[in-house]
């Protein structure tokens, strides 16, 4: 009898790693969350990042000319000032380098898990925790911070014939640096903030530039300059001077808020500056008419550029005042019927903002999808938490965007709220919390009431701030100071507390 070969012993089952907090994303929101958690004494956390490095939108958007439209000294964490910004409006490489330094300086590297895309978040009611399925295994966590960001997933229109275009196609946030545009016939679709930077950057080198513009944007001069060595020395050696500069920039932005949210008519003077800017940059009356919006300034995002209009007025540029309708081979057909032969298409068509893709991956109490919860429009309590999804905290959640100031100010406010919520849970001995339906509804009814008189709702435009039903679910209708007050502390009367489930011990056998 041949002995049966011995089977190797089965490997011991691997336990799913568990953490107190799982953070999704490593942009400003995710890295900021890591710093605030560590400062609060919470070190049991991971930062799950789908890419291979930190940076978020400032990693993904590396297109030519990419830069911030918020002054550098205001576009940084209050706890991590940077006295070495090279320009008053810094470029993408400098902002990305700043985020890398934040990760190093505050000891976040051990918490980072790169190439780990979150595929599903599912609330386990029995265990009062989140189960996180990623491309590299599973995690469980008591709480999840979604810092995936609204400018993370590019939006490309579903155009007939696009799949058969023989040339090169890419989105501005997925720039193909291996493809040389020099001498090519290039189409840029869209005239938003990214396109306004890309167009002047590539126009001198391309053979022919065709710009498809559905709606023109208002453009103001960009007061950008190199920051002198003396300024850097001063801010490095005497840090209060940097803090004063930041405070001044903050105050100036706060003073502008009233015109956007309560008295849009006050923006008329700003609009006159923009009109003069067009007149200086574009001499051709027909082109100037194409580029002049018919809505009030501020209704759509205001663009900042000194080079955009000269690039559009250049001899090798054509502005098509119509959207792109279809693609026939290498021919792009505009909504006005005009046809344009091109070699490459660059889409500057924005992101999934009012329909955040992360919502399709989140399942709360009873297995309800967040995308289903938000099918009629996104809403959260104080932009941070959602009824039916315990211990899920958003950074840059619904109605936390800004039209005139630094998002870092809003991020820091939401991080304060996050840490206070986790601290409150420990203090009361609860496992989780979720906003009451009543508190969430009251907050959003009041918010939308305030939104009615803002320039974003009354200015006569259609923008990416508005969802499919015309509701503004993106912006905050107030100052950053008022948002900080609203998120300074967690009001437990707005929440339902969830105790940790206790498993009853098995009944002992009684001997006969």
Image (spheres, rainbow, N blue to C red):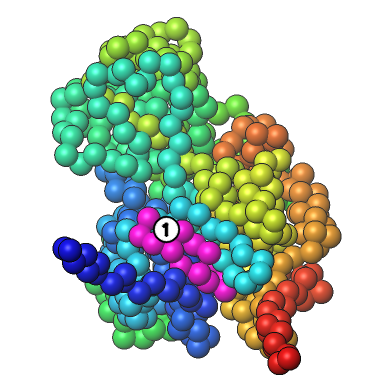
Quadrant for the N terminus, please.
bottom left
Q: Residue furthest bottom?
A: 511
The residue furthest front is 1
Residue 127 versus residue 323 in the image, above or below:
below
Instruction: Assign the C terminus to one quadrant of the image.
Output: bottom right
Q: Residues in magenta?
A: 131-145
Left of 248 or right of it: where is 500? right
Is residue 455 visible in the rendered image? The answer is no
Q: Nearer the viewer, residue 167 or 401?
A: 167
164 to the left or right of 412: left
Horizontal and vertical percent position of residue 128:
64, 71
In the rendered image, residue 379, in percent from the top left (x then y), is placed at: 69, 52
Label 1: which secondary element:
strand
Residue 366, how many percent across, how many down?
70, 56
Q: Is residue 280 magenta?
A: no
Name which residue lies at 37% across and 32% down: 347
Look at 50% across and 54% down and name the residue there. Answer: 120
| Closer-to-camera residue (46/129) | 129
């Amino acid at each position: 009898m041949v002995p049966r070969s011995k089977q190797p012993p089965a490997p011991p089952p691997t336990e799913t790693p568990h953490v107190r907090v799982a953070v999704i994303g490593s942009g400003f929101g995710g890295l900021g969350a890591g710093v605030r958690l560590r400062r609060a004494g919470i070190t049991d956390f991971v930062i799950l990042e789908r890419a291979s490095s930190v940076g978020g939108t400032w990693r993904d958007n590396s297109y030519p000319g990419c830069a911030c439209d918020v002054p550098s000294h205001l576009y940084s964490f209050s706890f991590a000032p940077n006295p070495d910004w090279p320009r008053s409006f810094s470029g993408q490489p400098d902002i990305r380098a700043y985020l890398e330094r934040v990760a190093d300086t505050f000891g976040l590297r051990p918490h980072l898990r790169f190439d780990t895309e979150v595929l599903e978040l599912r609330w386990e009611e029995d265990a009062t925790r989140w189960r996180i399925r990623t491309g590299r295994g599973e995690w469980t966590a008591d709480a999840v911070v979604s810092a995936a960001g609204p400018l993370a997933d590019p939006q490309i229109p579903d155009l007939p014939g696009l799949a058969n275009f023989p040339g090169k196609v890419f989105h501005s946030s997925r720039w193909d640096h291996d493809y040389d545009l020099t001498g090519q016939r290039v189409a840029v679709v869209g005239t938003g903030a990214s396109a306004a930077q890309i167009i002047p950057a590539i126009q001198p080198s391309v053979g022919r530039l065709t710009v498809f513009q559905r709606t023109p944007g208002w453009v103001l001069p960009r007061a950008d300059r190199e920051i002198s060595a003396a300024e850097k020395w001063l801010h490095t050696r005497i840090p209060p001077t940097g803090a004063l500069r930041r405070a001044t920039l903050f105050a100036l932005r706060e003073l502008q808020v009233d015109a956007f949210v309560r008295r849009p008519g006050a923006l008329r003077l700003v609009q006159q500056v923009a009109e003069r800017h067009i007149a200086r940059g574009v001499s051709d009356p027909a082109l100037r008419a194409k580029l002049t919006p018919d809505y009030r300034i501020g209704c759509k995002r205001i663009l900042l550029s000194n080079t955009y209009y000269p690039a559009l007025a250049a001899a090798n540029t054509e502005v098509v005042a119509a959207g792109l309708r279809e693609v026939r081979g290498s021919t792009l057909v505009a909504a006005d019927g005009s046809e344009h032969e091109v070699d490459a298409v660059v889409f500057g068509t924005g992101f999934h903002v009012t329909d955040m893709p992360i919502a399709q991956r989140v399942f709360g109490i009873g297995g309800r999808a967040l995308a289903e919860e938000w099918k009629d429009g996104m809403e959260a309590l104080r932009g941070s938490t959602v009824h039916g999804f315990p211990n899920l905290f958003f950074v840059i959640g619904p109605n936390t965007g800004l039209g005139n100031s630094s998002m870092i100010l809003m991020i820091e406010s939401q991080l304060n709220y996050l840490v206070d919520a986790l601290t409150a849970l420990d203090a009361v001995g609860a496992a989780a919390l979720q906003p009451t339906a009543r508190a969430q509804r009251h907050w959003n009814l009041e918010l939308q009431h305030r939104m009615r008189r803002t320039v974003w709702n009354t200015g006569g435009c259609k923008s990416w701030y508005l969802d499919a039903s015309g509701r503004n679910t993106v912006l905050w209708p107030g100052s950053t100071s008022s948002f900080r007050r609203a998120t300074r502390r967690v009001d437990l009367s707005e929440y339902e507390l969830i105790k940790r489930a206790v498993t009853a011990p098995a009944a002992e056998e009684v001997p006969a």
